[in-house]
Amino acid sequence: MTKSNKIRAAQLLVKCLEHEGVEYIFGIPGEENIGVMDALLDSEIRFIITRHEQGAAFMADVYGRLTGRAGVCMSTLGPGATNLVTGVADGNMDRAPLVAIAGQGATTRMHKESHQVLDLVNLFEPITKYSAQIREPEIVPEIVRKAFKFAQAEKPGAAFIDFPENIAEMEIEPMEPLRVQQPVAPTAARGKCAQVAEMIEKAKNPIIIAGNGLIRYDACDELVKFAESINAPVATTFMAKGAIPSSHPLSLGTFGLKAHDLVAFGIDEADLVICIGYDMVEYDPGHWNANCQHKIVHIDGSPAEVDTHYIVEAGVIGDLRDSMQRIAARCERPASKPMQKLRQKIVKELNAHAKDVGYPVKPQKIIYDIREVLEPEDIVISDVGAHKMWMARMFKAERPNTCIISNGFASMGIALPGAIAAKLVYPDRNILAVCGDSGFMMNSQEVETAVRLDLNITVIIFNDNKYGLIEWHQLREYGRKSHIDVSNPDFVKFAESFGANGYRVEKTEDLADTLETALNDGGVSIIDCPVDYSENMKLTHRLKSLTSIDE
C-alpha cells in the first residue's frame, strides 16, 4: 500500500505559524484543539501551558509589545475561548500585535444548539482587527497570513482565528505558507514637514507629547535628537515611558493623571503641542485640551482620530523617524526657560522620598527603591490599580519598553503573566512584576507556570487589603468609601506552596535589600510589601491646590 503524502489541516496551520516566525504559543489544550496540539509535537514552536486562558492572552500581549511580532495564544472552544477575551481586548486596545486561535466544534453541528458552541467570530470581531473562521483546509495559509498581517500592521492589534475540529482533521495535498509581507511606512510629504518646521520656529514655548507609537516605530533615538534640535521638552504618555530617558534634561516625565499634575502646567504654557505617535486611548485629549485652546501638530503613521479636543493645525503622516529628521533639518530655536524650571521641580519631587522610613511603606518610596535596585535595561511590568498611577508618575524609565503599563484597555491581572513573557523574550534581564494585592490575585495561579518554567522573575505586591484605586476615586468623588475591603492569603506561604520564594517587608529600611535578594535568588520570588495609600488623597489635595509652576 502506498503511503499517503497528504497532511492534516492542523499540520498546515502549524507550518504556517512556523513560517510567521512564531516562537511560543501560550495556552491550554482541549478536546477541540487536539489536532493542533499533536502537530506541535513535530514543531520547533514551544507550547507554554498556562493555568488560565486569560494568563495566556496576557503573555501573548506582552510578548507582542516587547518584540513587535505577534504573540500567539490558543484555547479550546466555548469557555476556553471566552477566557481569552480580556487579554485579547487588552492587546488590541494597547496596540500589541497578537493572534488568538481557538478550537471550535465541528461545522456539522454549528447550525444548531450544541454543546459549548458559540459564534466566536462575532464574539471576537469587536475586540480585534480581524476575526475569521477556517471553513476549508485550503484557506489555512491565507487566513494565517492575513491574521498576522493585520495584527502587525500599524497600528497593531489583535486578530482571531476560529478552527473547527473537523476541518483541523481533514487531509489535503501539501501546501506552502504565503510569503510574509508587511507594507513599508511611507515617507512624509515634504510640504507638510516644511509647514510644521515653520510653526515650530515661530513658537515660543512648544512642547512634545510622546506616545506609544514612537516605541512601536523604534523611533525613540530620533525623538531625543528631534527634541534636542528644536529645544522642546518632552512629556510621555504612560505607555511611552522611556521613549526619552527620564534623566535627559528635556524630559518632563509622564502625564496621564486626571488631576492637574505638574506636567500639565507645561502643556498649559505651551503655544504649540507637538504630538508624536500619540494614541488617544492612552490619555483623552479632553483632559489636556479641555477648552480647545492649543495649537496641535500631529506626527504619526496614521491620520489623527476625530475628536472635538484634537483638531490639528497640521498633520505629518509617515514613518516617524523620517518625519522627525525632515522637520528637524528645517528649524532651530532656543530653549524655553519656563520649561527648565518645571523640570527642576519635577525631578525634585521624584527624589523627595529617597530617605523616607515611614511604615507601611509609602508608594513613592517603593518606586524609588525599585529604580535604585534595577539596571536601566531591566523591565518592570505594572499591573492596574493605585500602584499603576504611582508607577506611571514616579518611575524613572531610562529605556523604551522597560516599563510596561496597560493603559489603553487598562486591565487588572496583566503583570504576572506579562513578566513570564518578558523573561522568555529577555532571559538575561531582571524582570519585576509590580502588582496590587487584588491584581495579583486575579492571575496568581500563573506562579505555578513561572515555577514550572524555572524562570527567575520577581513579583512585588503593594498590599493594602483593598481595591485601593477604587477607594481613591470614591474618596475624591464622594468623600467616603464603599465595598472595597478584601482579605488576602499569607503571600509568603502562598509563594512557598508553589515552590517559589516568599519575602515580607517588615520595615522600610529593608526594602532595597529585599528587592536585591529576590532578584538574585535564581527563581520565582514574591515580595509582600505593605503600602501606605493615605498618600493617594494627599496627592489629590496637593495637586488641586497648585495654580502655577512656581508653587
Image (spheres, helix red, strand yellow):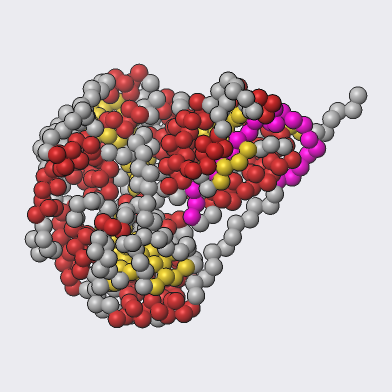
The span shown in magenta is: 155-177
Q: Is residue 162 magenta-colored? A: yes
Outermost right residue: 1
Q: Nearer the viewer, residue 160 or 515?
A: 160
Q: Residue at x 74, y 40 (%)?
A: 138
Q: Residue at x 72, y 37 (%)?
A: 136
The percent coordinates of residue 342 (x first, y second) are: 17, 64
Location of the N terminus (image quadrant): top right
The percent coordinates of residue 201 (x first, y second) are: 32, 80
Give the left or right position of residue 85, taking residue 131 as reference.
left
Q: Nearer the viewer, residue 281 or 377?
A: 281
Q: Residue at x 10, y 51 (%)?
A: 542
The percent coordinates of residue 113 (x first, y second) are: 59, 23
How many numbered callouts?
A: 0
In the picture, residue 476 is in which quadrant? top left
Give the left or right position of residue 492, taking residue 148 as reference.
left
Location of the C terminus (image quadrant): bottom left
**In this picture, is 385 found above or below 222?**
above
In the picture, residue 306 is in which quadrant? bottom left
Residue 326 visible? The answer is yes
Residue 406 visible? The answer is no
Q: Is residue 242 magenta-colored? A: no
Give the left or right position of residue 448, taking residue 204 as reference.
right
Q: Residue at x 68, y 46 (%)?
A: 142
The percent coordinates of residue 35 (x first, y second) are: 66, 27
